[in-house]
Structures are given as C-alpha cells and as structure tokens.
C-alpha cells in the first residue's frame, strides 16, 4: 500500500480529507501525526479509526526522530501538511506556537522527506520519483489588498498578522526546496473554510453554539469584515486534484468567489436557527447580535482569481452557500 502522511490530520480539514482519500483510493494508507493542541480533535481520530488503512500517531511534527520513525516504519511516499496554529486571540498574546506549528514542523518534515526520498541533493532514489508534498496555506498571506480586481497567485505576499507571516514563511521555505533540491511540492491557499465538525473557536461554530445557549453574538467593526467562504466538500475535492495532478512549484488559490460580511453570515445563521431550533421565548436569534467598532483584521477583502485551478484542474466550488450553511448549522443542533 502507498502510505501518505497527513501532518495535523486530526483537524477539521484533515478529518474530511482522510475520509475522502480512503474511500476513493483503496491502495492508500493514511497516517496522521497530530499534537491535538490546536484544531486537532480526538473525536476525529476515533471516527477515522473505524476506516481501514488508517494509523494515528500522537506527537509533534517538529520532533525530528518521531517523523523519521514514521517515514521508516511506513515508508512514507507522500505528505499533506495541514498543521496550523489557529487564528485565536491567544496567538496575538503569544505568537511562539505559530512558529513551532506553522514553520518548524514544516522544516522538519521537509528535511526528513528529502533524506528519505533522495540519495543526494536533487536526485531521487529509484522508485521514489513520484513522492510529493502538498502544503495547505491560507489566502491570509496576501494581507489587505485593494478591492480593485481579483487577487492572483502572482500577487506579492504581504502578511499583516503573526499567523499570516508564519504561513507565508513556510511557503517561502517550501519553494526554496523546489529550487534547491528539486523537491516535488505544491501549495494551496484556502479562503475561509466551513462545514460540519469544525471545532468551536472558529467563527461559525462559535456563533452557532453561543446562539443556542442564548448568549450575545458580538461582532467587531460593525460586522463589516469580509471573507470568501468555502464549503469543506469543495475543499477536499480541490486538495485531491492538486495533490495528485499539480506540477512541482505550483500554487493555487482555492476559493468560492462568494464574499460575505460577518454580519451577513451571522444573520444567515440566525435565520436558519429560527427554523431549525426556535427559541423557547419566541424571540428571533438575530436579537442576540451586538455590534461594536474595533480594529479591523488585516485580511484580503478583494476576490480571488481562480483561473489557475479552473484551467489546470477543471475545479470550481459546487456547493451553494445557502445549502452548505444549512447543513453546517444542522450538524451543531443536538
């Protein structure tokens, strides 16, 4: 069997991607390496363990010997790097975990993979020439761009938060391994992803949970911050195509081209909850919304150009926002 390592695989995207891969590719074994500190979830591990050809390793991807052991034990032939310290407020108070999770772990996996797959710099061992790495990055690396026109993969990276800077740094290092060591590496830059099983702490599950408990739904910047929202099923289809078909060094924007403000998103959530789980007091969930002014996040408010992925992969998002959000909200109602 062909063993694929998912670094940070126990998280939201990793769970859905694991199920997708193992259902589609009968000759794959998926190995998760996850610290279970950020988006990693033990419930996801338990669910994946019900699927054949799955193995979980609890540990830190920046620990060289642990990664070496996995490569040797399973003869790893591919890697998808999903690990990422999140965007929680704690990262602004202490950005160190961002460096450990978003950069050092990437470097460690890169070096172990290079030594396992190559006999010398740039020369792959016999039978290892199809080994590859895919890195899941974020459109946050673009920073705050002009709203005039769409952002392409050729736009300069201008990260404006520690999180975005750590992701952009990892991208630069990955690209250097393509140029220096001829490593087969591709990168995807995802917009905001949503769907069932996303952990609380992210915007949508947090707001759903708070609303169901009758708590205030607070929004900074009067809810005017914009995001492109992408449903998880569309994400895993894109990652599957890029991992298997992308040329080395390729970078792809992955987005829905459907942009909503936080306030629009929250009102849509409240409207669905009014139907699916009416409040006992008869009031609308929207009455819980509280707006306040505050520092706007440094995020790209322009749309994302998808010419590259449409042309190379024949991919586009197929899930309608309305149906994707209904499925997501329903999954959090007990």
Image (cartoon, rainbow, N blue to C red):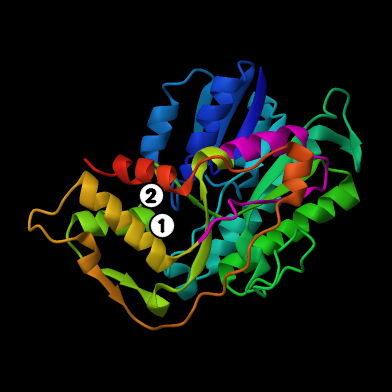
The residues tagged by marks 1 and 2 sit, at their Cα atoms, a distance apart of 7 Å
Q: Is residue 249 magenta?
A: yes
Determine whether, in the image, residue 192 is placed left or right of residue 293: right
The secondary element bearing badge 1 is classed as loop
| Residue 261 position in % (x across, y down) | 46, 67
What residue is drawn where x is 80% and y is 62%?
154
Quarter of the image with the C terminus in it: top left
What residue is drawn where x is 89% and y is 51%?
180
Q: Mark 2 highlights which residue?
A: 199
Residue 320 lies, with reference to residue 305, above or below; the image says: above
The circle drawn on residue 202 is 1
Quarter of the image with the N terminus in it: top right
Say whether residue 111 is visible: no
- Magenta-colored span: 236-259
| Residue 286 position in % (x across, y down) | 25, 64
State the image quarter where residue 2 is shown. top right
Q: Is residue 132 magenta?
A: no
Task: Give the crowd class for mark 2: few <14, some 14-19, many >=20 residues within 10 Å.
Answer: some
| Residue 148 position in % (x across, y down) | 69, 73
What residue is drawn where x is 56% and y is 40%?
318
Task: Give the crowd class for mark 1: few <14, some 14-19, many >=20 residues within 10 Å.
Answer: some
Determine whether, in the image, residue 23 is placed left or right of residue 168: left
Say whether residue 211 is visible: yes
Tell me if label 1 and label 2 are in contact, CB under 8 Å.
yes
């Amino acid at each position: 069997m062909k063993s694929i390592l998912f670094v940070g695989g126990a998280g939201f995207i990793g769970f859905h991607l694991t199920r997708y891969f193992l259902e589609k590719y009968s000759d794959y074994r998926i190995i998760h390496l996850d610290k279970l500190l950020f988006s990693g979830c033990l419930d996801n591990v338990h669910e994946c363990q019900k699927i054949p050809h799955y193995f979980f390793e609890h540990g830190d991807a920046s620990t060289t010997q642990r990664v070496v052991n996995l490569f040797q034990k399973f003869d790893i032939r591919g890697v998808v790097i999903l690990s990422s310290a999140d965007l929680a407020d704690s990262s602004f108070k202490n950005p160190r975990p961002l460096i450990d999770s978003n950069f050092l772990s990437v470097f460690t996996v890169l070096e172990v993979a290079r030594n396992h797959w190559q006999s010398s710099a740039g020369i792959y061992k016999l039978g290892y020439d199809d080994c590859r790495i895919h890195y899941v990055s974020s459109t946050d690396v673009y920073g705050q761009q002009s709203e005039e026109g769409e952002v392409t993969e050729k736009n300069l990276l201008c990260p404006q938060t520690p999180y975005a800077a750590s992701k952009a740094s990892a991208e630069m290092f990955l690209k250097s391994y393509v140029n220096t060591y001829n490593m087969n590496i591709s990168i995807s830059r995802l917009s905001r992803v949503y769907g069932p099983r996303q952990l609380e702490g992210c915007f949508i599950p947090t707001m759903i949970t708070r609303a169901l408990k009758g708590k205030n739904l607070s929004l900074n910047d009067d809810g005017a911050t914009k995001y492109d929202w992408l449903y998880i099923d569309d994400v895993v289809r894109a990652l599957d195509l890029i991992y298997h078909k992308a040329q080395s060094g390729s970078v792809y924007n992955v987005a829905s081209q459907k942009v909503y403000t936080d306030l629009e998103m929250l009102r849509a959530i409240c409207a669905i909850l009014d139907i699916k789980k009416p409040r006992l007091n008869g009031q609308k969930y929207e009455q819980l919304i509280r707006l306040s002014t505050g520092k706007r996040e440094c995020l790209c408010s322009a749309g994302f150009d998808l010419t590259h992925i449409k042309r190379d992969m024949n991919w586009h998002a197929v899930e309608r926002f309305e149906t994707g959000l209904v499925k997501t909200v329903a999954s959090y109602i007990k």
